[in-house]
Image (cartoon, grey):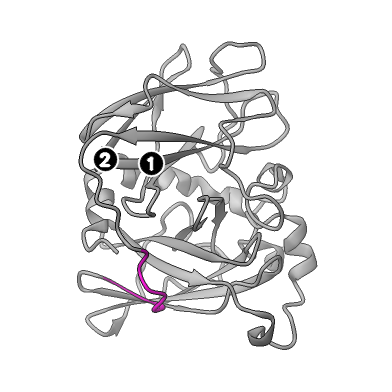
Amino acid sequence: MRNHTAHDQANHADHSNHQGHGGHHGHGDHSAHGGHGNHGAHGGGRPGGLSVSENGYTLEFDSTILTAGEQRLGFRVMGPDGRAVTEFVPEHEKELHFIAVRRDTSGFQHVHPVRDGKGTWSVELTLEPGDWRFFTDIHPAGHDGTMTLGIDVAVAGAYDPRPLPEATGVAQIGEYTVALDGELLPGEASELTLTVSRNNHPVTDLQPYLAAYGHLVALRVGDLGYLHVHPEGEPGDGVTAPGPEIAFMAVAPSAGTYRLYLDFQHEGVVRTAEFTVRTATAAHRPDPAPQAAPEHGSHHGHAHHGHHAHH
């Protein structure tokens, strides 16, 4: 686990902008853009991000062999007509959400590229040597729903893969501690609660980030299958408190080990807490099973922001 994970968000200017993802009021109507469920990308069935091409749309980078360090990369989403897509439906106030992670699950970065009029996107990343996976969440205009495309990229240099961190349930980021409670259940909706404290004092003034008090990405260890979830409730709904607890609904598409990345914002800085989580076995499943499982399962995991509870 990287101690300086917070550096990514602090240095990627875009990160705080990406409160635009903050436009995640989409969360409330996430069932409407069931794209995040339709393409099976976010839980329940096949996870997202495992293919570079889907529904005729293909992710194309200027280069997939890169040098290490800070750099600006260019890429396009090619449409079924063979041309770069120039019109997207904003999801959560952004046309495209970009996540980079090394194959050993280190180096997580969540940023928002910018697009020119010809359909070329530009993104700034800091990359260490090794094999990386890039993910893009998009909703091309004219296509019914969103999709997650993924591509492998090689960064030249001496690669020192990091062992998978232990599943401790606690992450330390500077003065902040984040504790994870709850279990991932294969194919079922399960609640995860993350509690944020600073120097052993509960943080009760988290700031909205992506129109929520936290943003969670889960990747399946082994193939980096992508599951993208958001918290139950949202700032200003009269119910959801700004910490210390942030509750999420998640559906693990299969048994196995997952890496969870929680972005949260406090005092103007976005930090990332990272966890290793193994799915619960049948013997350890809570009883009774979550009653919400059928509904959330139908939304394939991305629409777990509990807004269903508030509808």
Disc 1 marks which amino acid?
Answer: Trp
Sequence-wise, the earlier of marks 1 and 2 is: 2
Is label 2 in a helix, a strand or a loop? strand
Q: Left of 236 or right of it: where is 1?
A: left
Q: Name the residue at 56% across, 50% down.
A: 225
Residue nearest the viewer, comparing 104 with 37: 104
Question: Vertically, is 100 above or below 267?
Answer: above
The residue lying at 41 percent from left, 17 percent from top is 116
Kindly report the distance in space between the C-alpha atoms of the residues bearing marks 1 and 2.
Answer: 9 Å
Residue at the outermost right position: 294
Q: Which residues are magenta?
A: 164-172
Question: Which of the numbered marks, if any, corresponds to residue 127?
Answer: 2
x, y percent for residue 235: 49, 62
Residue bearing mark 1: 132
Tell me the quarter of the picture where residue 184 sits: bottom right
Quadrant into which the N terminus falls: bottom left
Residue drawn at 20 percent across, 73 percent down: 175
Residues at marks 1 and 2 touching, judged by CB atoms closer than 8 Å: yes
Tag 1, which secondary structure?
Answer: strand
**x and y, in percent, of residue 131 in the image:** 36, 41
Report if residue 168 lies within the magenta region.
yes
Q: Amino acid at mark 2?
A: Leu
Where residue 227 sits: x, y (%)?
57, 54
Q: Quadrant of the C terminus?
A: bottom right
Q: Is residue 115 left or right of residue 39?
A: left
The kind of secondary structure the magenta stretch mainly shows is: loop
Residue at position x 45%, y 51% from top?
210
- Within 10 Å of disc 2 (Cα), the crowding (few <14, some 14-19, many 20+) is many
* Residue 265, percent from left and from top: 34, 60
Asked if the stretch drawn in magenta spans residue 274, the answer is: no
Residue 48: which numbered mark, if any?
none
In this view, the residue in front, 164 or 86, is 164
